[in-house]
Image (cartoon, coloured by chain):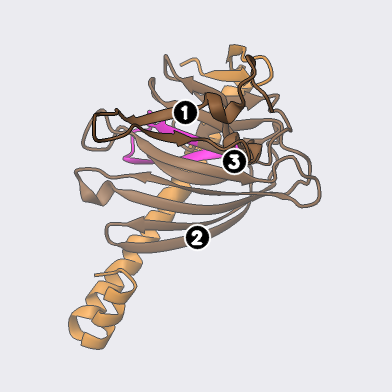
Amino acid sequence: MRAPGGWSLAERIKLVLGGATHSTPAKTLVLDEAIPNSLLASPAGQSLISSTTLGSDTASVTFSSIPATYKHLLVICQVRTTSAAAQDQLRVQFNSDTGANYDTMRLQVLSGGIGNAAVAGETSAQSLNLPGAGVARGAEAGVGQLVIANYAGTTFEKTFAAVGGFADSTIGNSILQHCASAWRNTAAINAIKLFPSAGPNFKSGSIFTLYGLN
Amino acid sequence: MALTELITDCSTGKQVFRKLTANEEGARLTEGAASAAADLATTQTHAADLAIVTAKAKTDPAFAALARLVGIA
């Protein structure tokens, strides 16, 4: 490849690491033209699809018309709910399906020990725990992520893995939850609805970000 | 209390707030109460089980060691 002006790309891309003196020659790093493009600009990675910061208390957040062009989806959120209790939970529905088609296996880590529960045939999937109004501090939020693998595929039913929770000054309120949840449907996912279990609202300032992974 | 849903169209980036209908709002509140009650029941069962384990561990060193190993200490 020849860059404009008759110089090769390697000749034009030189990074000077140290200046020359009477006894120390300049040190240069020359990028070789033979470096494959796959290393210079990898197409693999994470692309921001959408990010939302709530400006007011809101009952649910929906990402619709999700492009089918990625391999996987990643949702990252920082959330607090208006529930009067200390602990609330983030619920998930796909493609506006409100039927009893969601199953969850969850592992909860609490200050007093570990608990687990399997639930089947719910109208939404469980994911991660969130703080409500009952926690010690008013500005606490829960954090977590959901990984939805092969969301555009149609061979298998859809599954996702979630992890998240929060730590409170009142340690009895602190909780971490891992979930493997399933949607009994092989359709490609084009919409994700997120809402609090009890809520009824997410608090203003909560953030929801959707990434596409390749 | 009026509940709203925030919908983001990922193909256009357009965001729309939609007010839930009365039926949707009623269903949402009913479902929230039910799931909160279920979560509370699970937590209470867990706490009751934990109390039994803790009591047993006070009189049985081997059981206490086992409880510590599985994170109940």
Magenta span covers which residues?
A76-92
What is the letter of the brown chain? A
Instruction: Residue A64 in the image: state x and y as whole percent.
Output: 66, 24
> Label 3, label 2: how many angstroms apart (C-alpha)?
45 Å
Disc 3 is placed on an element classified as helix
Residue at x-position 48% and y-position 49%: B38
Position of A141 with respect to A51 (left or right) is left
Q: Nearer the viewer, residue A46 or A159?
A: A46
Query: Can you see residue B60?
Result: no
Query: Which badge, 3 or 2, comes first in the chain's sequence?
Result: 3
Mark 1 highlights which residue? A14
Residue matched to label 2: A117
Identify the secondary structure beneath mark 2: strand
The amino acid at mark 2 is Ala
- Is tag 1's residue or tag 3's residue first in the polypeptide sequence? 1
Which mark, residue A39? 3
Q: Which chain is orange?
A: B
Query: Pointer 2: residues within 10 angstroms few (<14), some, or many (20+)?
Result: few
The chain identifier of the residue carrying mark 3 reads A
Foreground residue, B35 or A208?
A208
**How far, Cα to Cα, is label 1 from label 2?**
59 Å
Residue A149 appears left or right of A136: right
* Badge nearest the viewer, 1 or 3: 1
Q: Is residue A83 magenta?
A: yes
Residue B10: image location, x then y, percent:
65, 21
| Image point (25%, 29%), residue name | A21
Q: Chain of mark 2?
A: A
* Label 1 and label 2 in one chain: yes
In the image, what residue occupies the spot 69% across and 31% down?
A: A96
Task: Give the quarter of the image for residue A148.
Answer: top right
Q: Residue at x 26, y 28 (%)?
A: A139
